[in-house]
């Protein structure tokens, strides 16, 4: 399975993979209320938290009575994949919602799930095939829950056979051997374990369980859960839907991988626990900072692209700050610089860059309210994607960043004629224009616009776009070339600083 930047291999030759279970409103009042209100902030926070804790895949379920899953599930998936880089498991019984979510999902997901019931097989498998997804095969048949290991395997065989008829290989199926609670059926655990073993040895398929149900109704549930996980791993389980932030569970899993010779050379175990004391100290310090220092918390939210609650944080900071712009200078700009650095180094990708920029946009709306009139803008800049080019995502990122750095941006949009840009320069007196082009066929138009502006104004021009090189930019008459959105900010800062110094020298 895969996101747009990360691939996770599942199989008996790999470590057991952790699927984070926490984005599921069942038994979670706050998350249920948030979903009913159309708020995805809590789900996004949970996604970030689970990845930090060690989740390698995230299960996404928005099933609350009264929620329109066909609208909400794609929305949640879209927001989550902007802040985490691990694959997703789409968890819903509403196949229309599943399909809509998969259409906007970047990567190869898991669909959770198809059962051995005829109706489910006919409804789900065509979607699995159409989008090349993996699928969880739930070993529930037309008779209901399976009584024992043998019925589980018979249902699994039915799913595999039907999938093969659709051209879906068994390697793309994760058989769910179903975990029942041992407090009411104590023999159920061993039946599940034996089914996992048979699925591996007889069917040669991957397996998955959502194992928290095993301990329902018992005290010290963590103890039962983590022990069952270790046993399931020894029987051949390849993936588990668990809470990755449950330390006892994760500790047991990592130790099990060493003992089962899945963590070769104990590399992962040593990475996590080799400097555990130091890491725990760092985590406690980080937690202390986040709890006690709102400014640090705001900084971290920008880095992580977490929009939830950011406006309240900024309002609280503003109550302590005499100068609102100090928030921009001391928190927002350094945070955006770090985001930009991570983007340039390939640590962050476009979705993270956009998410961080959106956090700052929300914050800046609050900050602007507190600024005296006339103190908001550091200078006027006109932006446009040149005539004939309808791609404007790069320009839009530049706009967000420039606005967040305090510039008054006049966005003329995409496919803009040179005459329109010239008219706007004359009308506004903006001293700097940014032109963008993504298509090689529109570079000629960019050159024409530059010549038009140079012939009729003293405006300076910065250019950027995927097809541009620095050499070509200067060849067509541009004053500045920016490879990244962060470069545009640097150019603007240098340009307006230079202008300010010239004005002082001239005595203006």
Image: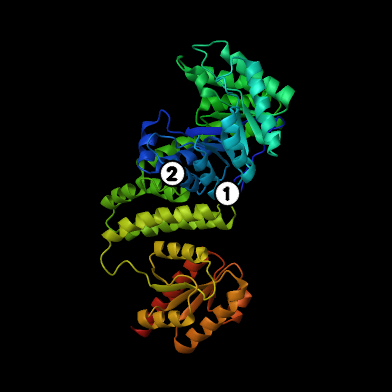
Q: Is residue 54 left or right of residue 129?
A: left
Using a 10 Å C-alpha cutoff, classify the residue at mark 1 as few (fewer than 14 neighbours), some (14 to 19) or many (20 or more). Answer: some
Pointer 1 residue: 106
Q: Which label belongs to residue 72?
A: 2
- Residue 80 lies, in percent from the top left, at 49, 45
Tally the marks: 2
Chosen colour scheme: rainbow
Using a 10 Å C-alpha cutoff, classify the residue at mark 2 as few (fewer than 14 neighbours), some (14 to 19) or many (20 or more). Answer: many
| Quadrant in the rendering for residue 465 | bottom right
At 52% from the left and 13% from the top, the residue drawn is: 182
Q: Which label belongs to residue 60?
A: none
At 52% from the left and 64% from the top, the residue drawn is: 394
At 57% from the left and 23% from the top, the residue drawn is: 142
| Quadrant in the rendering for residue 309 | top left
Q: Earlier in the sequence, mark 1 or mark 2?
A: 2
**Distance of mark 1 from mark 2, alpha carbons?**
17 Å
Q: Is residue 456 left or right of residue 263?
A: left
Q: Is residue 213 left or right of residue 299?
A: right
Q: Provide the secondary structure element on which disc 1 rests.
A: loop
Q: Is residue 113 above or below residue 299?
A: above
In this rendering, does residue 469 appear at all?
no
Locate the C terminus by quadrant.
Answer: bottom left
Q: Is residue 204 above or below residue 183?
A: below
At 49% from the left and 68% from the top, the residue drawn is: 488
Tag 1 near tag 2, CB within 8 Å: no
Q: Provide the secondary structure element on which disc 2 rests.
A: helix
Locate the N terminus by quadrant.
Answer: top right
């Amino acid at each position: 399975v895969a996101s747009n930047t990360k691939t996770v291999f599942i199989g008996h030759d790999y470590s057991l993979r952790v699927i984070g279970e926490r984005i599921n409103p069942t038994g979670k009042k706050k998350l249920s209320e948030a979903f009913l209100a159309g708020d995805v902030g809590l789900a996004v926070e949970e996604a970030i938290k689970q990845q930090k804790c060690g989740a390698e895949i995230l299960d996404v379920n928005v099933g609350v009575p009264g929620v329109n899953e066909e609208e909400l599930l794609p929305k949640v998936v879209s927001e989550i994949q902007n802040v985490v880089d691990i694959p997703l498991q789409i968890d819903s019984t509403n196949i229309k919602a599943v399909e809509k979510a998969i259409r906007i999902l970047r990567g190869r997901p898991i669909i959770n799930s198809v059962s051995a019931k005829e109706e489910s097989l006919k409804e789900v498998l065509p979607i699995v095939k159409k989008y090349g997804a993996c699928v969880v095969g739930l070993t529930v048949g037309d008779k209901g829950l399976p009584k024992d290991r043998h019925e589980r395997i018979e249902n699994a065989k039915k799913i595999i056979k039907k999938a093969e008829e659709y051209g879906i290989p068994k390697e793309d199926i994760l058989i769910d051997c179903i975990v029942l609670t041992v407090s009411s059926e104590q023999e159920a655990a061993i039946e599940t374990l034996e089914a996992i073993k048979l699925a591996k040895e007889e069917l040669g398929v991957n397996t998955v369980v959502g194992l928290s149900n095993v301990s329902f109704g018992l005290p010290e549930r963590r103890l039962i859960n983590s022990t069952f996980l270790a046993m399931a791993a020894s029987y051949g389980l390849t993936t588990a839907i668990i809470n990755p932030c449950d330390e006892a569970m994760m500790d047991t899993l990592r130790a099990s991988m060493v003992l089962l010779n899945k963590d070769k050379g104990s590399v992962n175990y040593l990475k996590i626990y080799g400097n555990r004391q130091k890491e725990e100290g760092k985590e406690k310090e980080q937690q202390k900072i986040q709890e006690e220092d709102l400014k640090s918390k705001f900084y971290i939210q920008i880095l992580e692209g977490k929009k939830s609650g950011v406006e309240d944080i900024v309002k609280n900071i503003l109550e302590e700050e005499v100068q609102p712009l100090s928030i921009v200078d001391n928190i927002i700009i350094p945070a955006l610089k770090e985001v930009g650095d991570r983007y340039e180094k390939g640590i962050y990708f476009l979705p993270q860059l956009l998410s961080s920029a959106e956090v700052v946009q929300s914050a800046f709306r609050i900050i602007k309210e507190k600024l005296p009139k006339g103190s908001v803008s550091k200078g006027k800049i006109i932006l446009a994607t040149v005539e004939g080019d309808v791609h404007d995502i790069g320009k839009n990122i530049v706009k967000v960043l420039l606005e967040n750095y305090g510039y008054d941006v006049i966005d003329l949009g995409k496919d803009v004629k040179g005459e329109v840009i010239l008219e706007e320069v004359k009308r506004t007196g903006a001293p700097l224009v940014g032109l963008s082009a993504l298509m090689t066929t529109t570079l000629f138009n960019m050159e024409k616009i530059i010549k038009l502006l140079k012939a009729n104004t003293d405006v300076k021009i910065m250019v950027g776009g995927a097809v541009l090189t620095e050499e070509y930019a200067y060849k067509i008459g541009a004053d500045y070339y920016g490879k990244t959105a962060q470069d545009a900010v640097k150019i603007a800062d240098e340009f307006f600083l230079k202008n300010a110094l010239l004005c002082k020298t001239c005595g203006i």
